[in-house]
Image (tube, coloured by chain):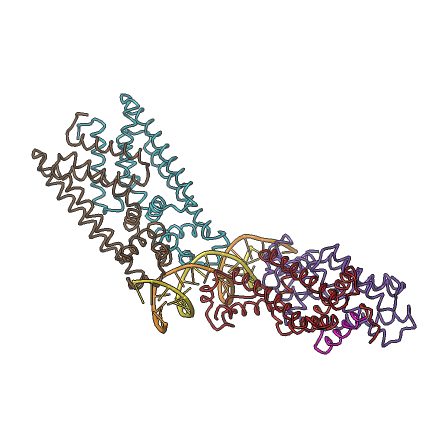
Chain colours: A brown, B cyan, C red, D purple, E orange, F yellow
Amino acid sequence: MTKEKILQAAINQYSLYSYHGATMRKIAQEVGIKPASIYFFYKNKESLFLDAFQKLLKDHLNQMKEILEDVHDEPILSIFEALLKGTVDYHKKHEAETNVYISLVTSPPKEIHQTLLEHIQTFDKWMTHSLLELIRRDKPEIDEAHSQKLIKQFSVILDGVFWEIKLYNDQELKQQIDEALYIMRVLMGGNEK
Amino acid sequence: MTKEKILQAAINQYSLYSYHGATMRKIAQEVGIKPASIYFFYKNKESLFLDAFQKLLKDHLNQMKEILEDVHDEPILSIFEALLKGTVDYHKKHEAETNVYISLVTSPPKEIHQTLLEHIQTFDKWMTHSLLELIRRDKPEIDEAHSQKLIKQFSVILDGVFWEIKLYNDQELKQQIDEALYIMRVLMGGNEK
Amino acid sequence: MTKEKILQAAINQYSLYSYHGATMRKIAQEVGIKPASIYFFYKNKESLFLDAFQKLLKDHLNQMKEILEDVHDEPILSIFEALLKGTVDYHKKHEAETNVYISLVTSPPKEIHQTLLEHIQTFDKWMTHSLLELIRRDKPEIDEAHSQKLIKQFSVILDGVFWEIKLYNDQELKQQIDEALYIMRVLMGGNEK
Amino acid sequence: MTKEKILQAAINQYSLYSYHGATMRKIAQEVGIKPASIYFFYKNKESLFLDAFQKLLKDHLNQMKEILEDVHDEPILSIFEALLKGTVDYHKKHEAETNVYISLVTSPPKEIHQTLLEHIQTFDKWMTHSLLELIRRDKPEIDEAHSQKLIKQFSVILDGVFWEIKLYNDQELKQQIDEALYIMRVLMGGNEK
DNA sequence: CATGAATGAGGCTTCATTCAT
DNA sequence: GATGAATGAAGCCTCATTCAT
């Protein structure tokens, strides 16, 4: 229990002040213990953050998988929608984690660089693979090459919406999601509006 | 001269280690002076970084303006292309600045929060306004509402490409830019490929 | 224990070098600890000295009260004598404290200015009040106006002896005390020598 | 001109913050020059303050001599009065210098310790000698032993008034001077009031 | 005369960490 | 499990001082 609270506090502090600004004292304070107590659970600051980062990446992957499972049987456009909205929801609800993730991608501490690259690749492969399957199921008429292209296009848009979480307020973001969905609809041959 | 070098070193260090990890010692070392000398030019660490951030935002805006000026008279699709490639080029060439910018957006120090919000708004307004004008010039048949929509769609895609600078290598990025341009072409009614 | 030793060292160092010359390093050295350890007990240098000054003033008042209690029942001239000698003894035995006190009176740091004024007033009132009572008890024939005057005269003389602690050696000081007592005897109408 | 301004600024700063707190920067600032410029006039901080202290002591002695000259021919009680009031006036008008003097007496920097002791002795001898002469002239009936005693008594009282400059406000101080003069009158056999 | 630019030394303070309790 | 007490290392910053201009 305390151990998890420490982990969360570490992430919160890192999200605000990055590695060197996330002091053991502030983390302890957030948990309501003394700094010395952290060392009962973690060997040192570095190992604490390695743990925190690992948990962070794992949680993120799980969350995305859950989102996909929930809409597994719906038409592909609904799945795109669910992924877009799910991404936004998740990151709005886990602001600290998102900030840490962005920070890790931007300036990865060398200790985590490898793990991070692997995560990004895993995530990418999983998403590509899943979407390929789901497109085939919903729209068998689309050949694989086209699917691949669609997925790449979707990823630009998903990444765009992801970054705009940090730029826009809730209302503007909703509009951007609508535009994103509109684009996907157009790309999938829907000239219906 | 020394003053500018300090500014650049501050940005480089911040990009790697964020505020608390960008120590005066490391900044001085990068410049080739002693830490005490920094204080001849800047009152303290905070004011040094405030200056650095301001310069960063100003440079970024100027750069984007320059890009747009260079392609001012070309068709709108070329302009979209120039903006996408220009953005990528600029941020690849100024990795440190980009990382700092991302870090500022993600976890803005309160001293710069206001300045940052204003910059983002200024940038947004300028880009919207410029593109509106350029679309009207090149495609007078598109009404303003549609233009507005197109610009929003472009911004999602531009933001997507921007974020993917941090995710993909040069080759993958080039592909993503191609997909981005393809999307814009489709959105502008071009069924020509 | 360590906390009190720090306080004493702070006073000693302040007495020698004043605030800016009383460095945390020298204080720590005197206590036999490292500078960082001071911060476990005191938030910072300022609060350490605020504590030290408060203790100093409190101790001084207590000491004076004790002196008076010890001679409470003796004739008033003996009381004057006890106060003069007690003051000299106390300040000779607590040279550092005396120097700090003088320094505080001369150039009071603004943080302690108010506290100091209150202390001086409290001390003054207490002494005036006590002596009034004791004169009345020993010499009921002296009316209050005269008593007030006598006390003021005594205070000039006491302050003179106090300042001469810093000017004269032990032997000269003893002579000055004798003169002081002689003056008081004369002032109280004693032409007996 | 600048040299004297530096000297005065040094004394002012010393009076407020003592040696270690009187920084070259603040002294320069008070004069309206840059710290580096001070080194044109003084070899270093230590020599600047040695000069300042010497001037201080010399000025003080001169001032006291002047006071005495002005009342040279008056009766001895007027001379006591002039000395008391002159002392108070001088120190009220030269607060910084007084504070420095007190600080020097209390915690003399070793570089000036010897000079200071000599000054105090010179001052003492001069005053004793002068007063002896003046008493003899005004009251030839008082023998030298008695004069010596009177002078010692006056010195306690003068020192008392001197210290009370730092303790009391102008009005209270005037009262204390009156009491002091009253005492001297009584001591000189005056039962007239 | 004056100062812009620089720096070694040292100031205060916080950091991560240890260890006995 | 937890922490009071301690510390070496390092953080930011100011100090007195120098020197070329």
D179, above or below C161, in the image: above
Residue B93 coordinates in the image, percent (x, y): 32, 46
Q: Residue at x 34, y 33 (%)?
A: B127
B130, above or below C137, in the image: above
Foreground pick, F3 / C151: C151
Residue B126, image quadrant: top left
Residue B33, image quadrant: bottom left
Residue C31 coordinates in the image, percent (x, y): 50, 72
C34, above or below B70, in the image: below
Magenta-colored span: C168-185
Position of the C terminus of chain A by quadrant: top left
Foreground pick, C134 / B59: C134
Residue D93 coordinates in the image, percent (x, y): 74, 56
Q: Residue at x 13, y 43 (%)?
A: A130
Position of the N terminus of chain A by quadrant: bottom left
Horizontal side, residue C10 vs residue A162: left or right? right
Judge whether residue C30 is colored magenta.
no
Q: Residue at x 77, y 65 (%)?
A: C140
